[in-house]
Amino acid sequence: MGTELRRPLVVDLALACHPAPTVAVTVFAAAMAAGADAPPVTTALVGAAVLAGQLSVGWSNDWIDAERDAAVGRSDKPVGLGRLAVGTVRSAALGAAALCVVLSLALGWRAGLVHLATVASAWAYNARLKSTVWSWAPYAFSFGFLPLAIALALPGAPVAAWWAMAAGALLGIGAHGANVVPDLQDDQDTGVRGLPHRLGGTATSIGTALALLGATVLLVLAPSGPPRAAAAAVLVAAVGLTIVGTVLALGGGRNRLPFLFAIAVAAVDVVLLVLSDWVVTA
Protein backbone atom coordinates (compact mmCIF):
# COMPACT_ATOMS: atom_id res chain seq x y z
CA MET A 1 0.00 0.00 0.00
CA GLY A 2 1.23 3.46 -0.84
CA THR A 3 1.24 6.24 1.66
CA GLU A 4 0.13 9.76 0.86
CA LEU A 5 2.70 12.44 1.55
CA ARG A 6 1.12 15.03 3.80
CA ARG A 7 2.15 18.65 3.60
CA PRO A 8 3.09 20.45 6.81
CA LEU A 9 0.25 22.35 8.46
CA VAL A 10 1.97 25.68 7.87
CA VAL A 11 2.04 25.00 4.10
CA ASP A 12 -1.68 24.24 3.97
CA LEU A 13 -2.41 27.35 6.03
CA ALA A 14 -0.31 29.42 3.63
CA LEU A 15 -2.24 28.02 0.66
CA ALA A 16 -5.56 28.66 2.40
CA CYS A 17 -4.86 32.35 3.04
CA HIS A 18 -5.10 33.19 -0.69
CA PRO A 19 -1.37 33.97 -0.86
CA ALA A 20 -1.21 35.99 -4.10
CA PRO A 21 -3.64 38.77 -3.12
CA THR A 22 -2.53 38.63 0.52
CA VAL A 23 1.11 39.25 -0.35
CA ALA A 24 0.26 41.75 -3.09
CA VAL A 25 -1.99 43.97 -0.96
CA THR A 26 0.51 43.89 1.92
CA VAL A 27 3.43 44.87 -0.31
CA PHE A 28 1.38 47.57 -2.05
CA ALA A 29 0.31 49.10 1.27
CA ALA A 30 3.86 49.14 2.63
CA ALA A 31 5.12 50.64 -0.64
CA MET A 32 2.52 53.40 -0.47
CA ALA A 33 3.50 54.22 3.10
CA ALA A 34 7.22 54.23 2.28
CA GLY A 35 6.61 56.30 -0.86
CA ALA A 36 4.79 58.88 1.26
CA ASP A 37 7.92 59.21 3.46
CA ALA A 38 6.43 57.41 6.44
CA PRO A 39 8.93 56.63 9.22
CA PRO A 40 10.31 53.09 8.91
CA VAL A 41 8.44 51.99 12.03
CA THR A 42 5.15 53.27 10.60
CA THR A 43 5.81 51.57 7.27
CA ALA A 44 6.50 48.27 9.02
CA LEU A 45 3.41 48.65 11.18
CA VAL A 46 1.23 49.40 8.14
CA GLY A 47 2.56 46.27 6.47
CA ALA A 48 1.96 44.16 9.58
CA ALA A 49 -1.59 45.44 10.10
CA VAL A 50 -2.53 44.95 6.46
CA LEU A 51 -0.97 41.47 6.44
CA ALA A 52 -2.94 40.42 9.53
CA GLY A 53 -6.13 41.76 7.97
CA GLN A 54 -5.52 40.00 4.66
CA LEU A 55 -4.72 36.72 6.41
CA SER A 56 -7.97 36.94 8.34
CA VAL A 57 -9.92 37.63 5.14
CA GLY A 58 -8.31 34.78 3.19
CA TRP A 59 -8.74 32.24 5.96
CA SER A 60 -12.30 33.31 6.67
CA ASN A 61 -13.12 32.80 3.01
CA ASP A 62 -11.91 29.19 3.06
CA TRP A 63 -13.60 28.57 6.42
CA ILE A 64 -16.97 29.92 5.27
CA ASP A 65 -16.77 28.29 1.83
CA ALA A 66 -15.49 24.90 3.01
CA GLU A 67 -18.64 22.99 2.05
CA ARG A 68 -18.96 24.76 -1.31
CA ASP A 69 -15.31 24.12 -2.16
CA ALA A 70 -15.64 20.46 -1.26
CA ALA A 71 -18.81 20.13 -3.34
CA VAL A 72 -17.13 21.35 -6.53
CA GLY A 73 -13.78 19.66 -5.87
CA ARG A 74 -11.61 22.76 -5.61
CA SER A 75 -8.13 21.22 -5.78
CA ASP A 76 -6.50 24.53 -4.80
CA LYS A 77 -8.34 24.71 -1.47
CA PRO A 78 -6.78 22.64 1.39
CA VAL A 79 -9.97 22.93 3.46
CA GLY A 80 -12.19 21.76 0.64
CA LEU A 81 -9.88 18.80 0.03
CA GLY A 82 -9.99 17.82 3.69
CA ARG A 83 -6.28 18.46 4.16
CA LEU A 84 -7.00 21.26 6.61
CA ALA A 85 -9.69 21.06 9.30
CA VAL A 86 -12.39 23.72 9.22
CA GLY A 87 -11.78 24.38 12.93
CA THR A 88 -8.10 25.05 12.26
CA VAL A 89 -8.68 27.61 9.54
CA ARG A 90 -11.50 29.21 11.58
CA SER A 91 -9.16 29.62 14.56
CA ALA A 92 -6.47 31.05 12.28
CA ALA A 93 -8.94 33.56 10.81
CA LEU A 94 -10.18 34.73 14.21
CA GLY A 95 -6.63 34.92 15.59
CA ALA A 96 -5.45 36.99 12.64
CA ALA A 97 -8.49 39.26 13.01
CA ALA A 98 -7.69 39.85 16.71
CA LEU A 99 -4.07 40.64 15.83
CA CYS A 100 -5.29 42.98 13.09
CA VAL A 101 -7.30 44.97 15.65
CA VAL A 102 -4.24 45.46 17.86
CA LEU A 103 -1.90 46.37 15.00
CA SER A 104 -4.40 48.67 13.29
CA LEU A 105 -5.13 50.68 16.43
CA ALA A 106 -1.38 50.97 17.01
CA LEU A 107 -1.36 53.15 13.87
CA GLY A 108 -3.62 55.65 15.66
CA TRP A 109 -7.33 55.48 16.26
CA ARG A 110 -8.28 57.23 13.00
CA ALA A 111 -6.14 55.06 10.77
CA GLY A 112 -7.02 52.00 12.83
CA LEU A 113 -10.77 52.44 12.56
CA VAL A 114 -10.62 53.07 8.82
CA HIS A 115 -8.43 50.02 8.23
CA LEU A 116 -10.64 47.84 10.42
CA ALA A 117 -13.65 49.03 8.42
CA THR A 118 -11.96 47.83 5.20
CA VAL A 119 -11.29 44.44 6.77
CA ALA A 120 -14.85 44.19 8.09
CA SER A 121 -16.12 44.97 4.60
CA ALA A 122 -14.10 42.08 3.18
CA TRP A 123 -15.47 39.74 5.86
CA ALA A 124 -18.98 40.89 4.95
CA TYR A 125 -18.29 39.85 1.37
CA ASN A 126 -17.20 36.39 2.48
CA ALA A 127 -20.13 35.96 4.84
CA ARG A 128 -23.02 37.17 2.70
CA LEU A 129 -22.53 39.89 0.09
CA LYS A 130 -20.72 37.68 -2.43
CA SER A 131 -24.10 36.06 -3.16
CA THR A 132 -25.91 39.34 -3.82
CA VAL A 133 -26.05 41.98 -6.52
CA TRP A 134 -23.86 44.08 -4.18
CA SER A 135 -20.91 41.69 -4.41
CA TRP A 136 -18.75 44.44 -5.93
CA ALA A 137 -19.35 46.91 -3.10
CA PRO A 138 -17.01 45.42 -0.44
CA TYR A 139 -14.16 45.37 -2.96
CA ALA A 140 -14.80 48.99 -3.90
CA PHE A 141 -15.05 50.03 -0.25
CA SER A 142 -12.00 48.12 1.00
CA PHE A 143 -9.68 49.11 -1.84
CA GLY A 144 -11.04 52.65 -1.94
CA PHE A 145 -10.51 53.39 1.74
CA LEU A 146 -7.14 51.65 2.14
CA PRO A 147 -5.25 54.75 0.88
CA LEU A 148 -7.08 56.84 3.49
CA ALA A 149 -6.10 54.42 6.27
CA ILE A 150 -2.45 54.59 5.18
CA ALA A 151 -2.49 58.40 4.93
CA LEU A 152 -4.04 58.78 8.38
CA ALA A 153 -1.21 56.67 9.82
CA LEU A 154 1.38 59.22 8.66
CA PRO A 155 2.70 61.97 10.96
CA GLY A 156 0.11 64.74 11.24
CA ALA A 157 -2.70 62.39 10.09
CA PRO A 158 -3.15 63.81 6.56
CA VAL A 159 -5.77 62.37 4.21
CA ALA A 160 -5.70 60.68 0.82
CA ALA A 161 -6.59 62.61 -2.33
CA TRP A 162 -10.07 61.89 -3.65
CA TRP A 163 -8.70 60.54 -6.90
CA ALA A 164 -6.43 58.08 -5.06
CA MET A 165 -9.45 56.69 -3.24
CA ALA A 166 -11.57 56.63 -6.39
CA ALA A 167 -8.81 54.79 -8.26
CA GLY A 168 -8.58 52.32 -5.39
CA ALA A 169 -12.32 51.68 -5.61
CA LEU A 170 -12.08 51.04 -9.36
CA LEU A 171 -9.15 48.69 -8.79
CA GLY A 172 -11.27 46.83 -6.26
CA ILE A 173 -14.13 46.44 -8.71
CA GLY A 174 -11.69 45.19 -11.34
CA ALA A 175 -10.10 42.75 -8.92
CA HIS A 176 -13.54 41.41 -8.01
CA GLY A 177 -14.40 40.69 -11.62
CA ALA A 178 -11.04 39.11 -12.44
CA ASN A 179 -11.20 36.94 -9.31
CA VAL A 180 -14.75 35.68 -9.85
CA VAL A 181 -14.82 34.97 -13.60
CA PRO A 182 -12.90 31.65 -13.43
CA ASP A 183 -15.33 30.32 -10.78
CA LEU A 184 -18.63 31.47 -12.29
CA GLN A 185 -19.97 27.99 -13.01
CA ASP A 186 -18.80 26.46 -9.73
CA ASP A 187 -20.28 29.38 -7.80
CA GLN A 188 -23.63 29.13 -9.51
CA ASP A 189 -23.73 25.38 -8.87
CA THR A 190 -23.41 26.07 -5.14
CA GLY A 191 -25.88 28.95 -4.93
CA VAL A 192 -23.57 31.97 -5.23
CA ARG A 193 -25.21 34.68 -7.35
CA GLY A 194 -23.15 37.84 -7.18
CA LEU A 195 -23.23 40.61 -9.77
CA PRO A 196 -20.73 38.90 -12.13
CA HIS A 197 -22.88 35.75 -12.14
CA ARG A 198 -25.89 37.79 -13.17
CA LEU A 199 -23.99 39.68 -15.88
CA GLY A 200 -22.16 36.67 -17.31
CA GLY A 201 -18.51 36.06 -18.08
CA THR A 202 -18.18 38.26 -21.18
CA ALA A 203 -19.80 41.35 -19.68
CA THR A 204 -17.86 40.91 -16.44
CA SER A 205 -14.55 40.57 -18.28
CA ILE A 206 -15.22 43.75 -20.27
CA GLY A 207 -16.35 45.61 -17.15
CA THR A 208 -13.23 44.43 -15.33
CA ALA A 209 -11.01 45.82 -18.08
CA LEU A 210 -12.83 49.17 -18.04
CA ALA A 211 -12.52 49.45 -14.25
CA LEU A 212 -8.79 48.68 -14.28
CA LEU A 213 -8.13 51.10 -17.13
CA GLY A 214 -10.29 53.74 -15.47
CA ALA A 215 -8.22 53.51 -12.30
CA THR A 216 -4.98 53.91 -14.23
CA VAL A 217 -6.22 56.82 -16.35
CA LEU A 218 -7.45 58.56 -13.20
CA LEU A 219 -4.05 58.20 -11.55
CA VAL A 220 -2.35 59.67 -14.62
CA LEU A 221 -4.70 62.59 -15.30
CA ALA A 222 -6.20 63.59 -11.93
CA PRO A 223 -3.05 64.77 -10.04
CA SER A 224 -2.33 68.48 -10.45
CA GLY A 225 0.11 69.49 -13.16
CA PRO A 226 0.86 67.88 -16.51
CA PRO A 227 1.32 64.09 -16.52
CA ARG A 228 4.92 62.96 -16.12
CA ALA A 229 6.63 61.01 -18.87
CA ALA A 230 7.08 58.12 -16.43
CA ALA A 231 3.34 58.15 -15.70
CA ALA A 232 2.56 57.94 -19.41
CA ALA A 233 4.91 54.96 -19.76
CA VAL A 234 3.24 53.27 -16.80
CA LEU A 235 -0.17 53.88 -18.38
CA VAL A 236 0.97 52.10 -21.55
CA ALA A 237 2.15 49.15 -19.45
CA ALA A 238 -1.19 49.01 -17.60
CA VAL A 239 -3.12 49.07 -20.87
CA GLY A 240 -1.04 46.18 -22.20
CA LEU A 241 -1.52 44.11 -19.05
CA THR A 242 -5.26 44.78 -19.04
CA ILE A 243 -5.66 43.75 -22.68
CA VAL A 244 -3.79 40.50 -22.14
CA GLY A 245 -5.74 39.73 -18.97
CA THR A 246 -9.06 40.43 -20.70
CA VAL A 247 -8.22 38.20 -23.67
CA LEU A 248 -7.34 35.38 -21.28
CA ALA A 249 -10.55 35.89 -19.32
CA LEU A 250 -12.67 35.81 -22.47
CA GLY A 251 -11.08 32.45 -23.27
CA GLY A 252 -13.15 30.92 -20.48
CA GLY A 253 -12.22 28.06 -18.18
CA ARG A 254 -10.78 28.10 -14.68
CA ASN A 255 -7.84 30.33 -15.55
CA ARG A 256 -6.25 32.29 -12.71
CA LEU A 257 -3.96 34.28 -15.00
CA PRO A 258 -6.47 37.15 -15.52
CA PHE A 259 -6.54 37.70 -11.76
CA LEU A 260 -2.74 37.74 -11.65
CA PHE A 261 -2.75 40.27 -14.48
CA ALA A 262 -5.20 42.38 -12.45
CA ILE A 263 -2.72 42.27 -9.56
CA ALA A 264 0.01 43.36 -11.99
CA VAL A 265 -2.13 46.34 -13.06
CA ALA A 266 -2.60 47.20 -9.39
CA ALA A 267 1.19 47.09 -8.95
CA VAL A 268 1.56 49.49 -11.86
CA ASP A 269 -1.00 51.80 -10.27
CA VAL A 270 0.85 51.72 -6.95
CA VAL A 271 3.91 52.96 -8.85
CA LEU A 272 1.77 55.81 -10.19
CA LEU A 273 0.62 56.62 -6.66
CA VAL A 274 4.19 56.67 -5.36
CA LEU A 275 5.15 59.03 -8.20
CA SER A 276 2.27 61.38 -7.39
CA ASP A 277 1.29 63.61 -4.48
CA TRP A 278 -1.61 61.49 -3.27
CA VAL A 279 -1.33 62.55 0.39
CA VAL A 280 -3.18 65.78 1.18
CA THR A 281 -2.25 67.80 4.25
CA ALA A 282 -5.18 69.67 5.76
Image (spheres, helix red, strand yellow):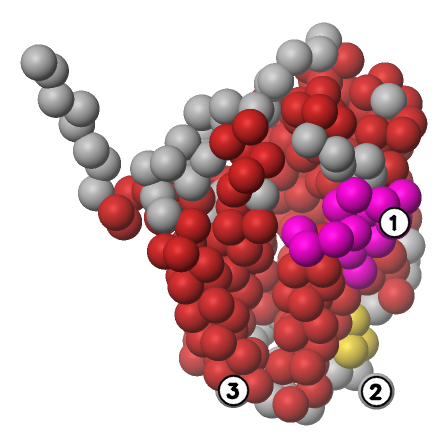
Q: Magenta span has 127?
A: yes
- Badge 3 amino acid: Ala
Q: In this picture, which residue range is highlighted in magenta?
A: 126-141
Secondary structure type for disc 3? loop
- Quadrant location of residue 197? top right
What residue is shown with label 2?
Answer: 282
Which marked residue is nearer to the observer: mark 2 or mark 3? 3
Q: Is residue 47 above or below residue 14?
A: below
Can residue 227 be seen here? no
Q: CA distance from mark 3 to mark 1?
A: 32 Å
Q: Quadrant of the N terminus?
A: top left
Q: Is residue 176 above or below residue 126?
A: above
- Tell how many labels: 3
What residue is shown with label 3?
Answer: 106
Q: Position of residue 126 (x, y in %)?
A: 66, 52
> Which residue is at 62% across, 38% downward?
263
Q: Position of residue 41 (x, y in %)?
A: 44, 79
Which marked residue is nearer to the observer: mark 2 or mark 1? 1
Secondary structure type for disc 2? loop
Q: Is residue 259 left or right of residue 69?
A: right
Q: Which mark is residue 134?
A: 1
Secondary structure type for disc 1? loop
- Quadrant location of residue 156? bottom right
> Which residue is at 81% across, 36% downward?
193
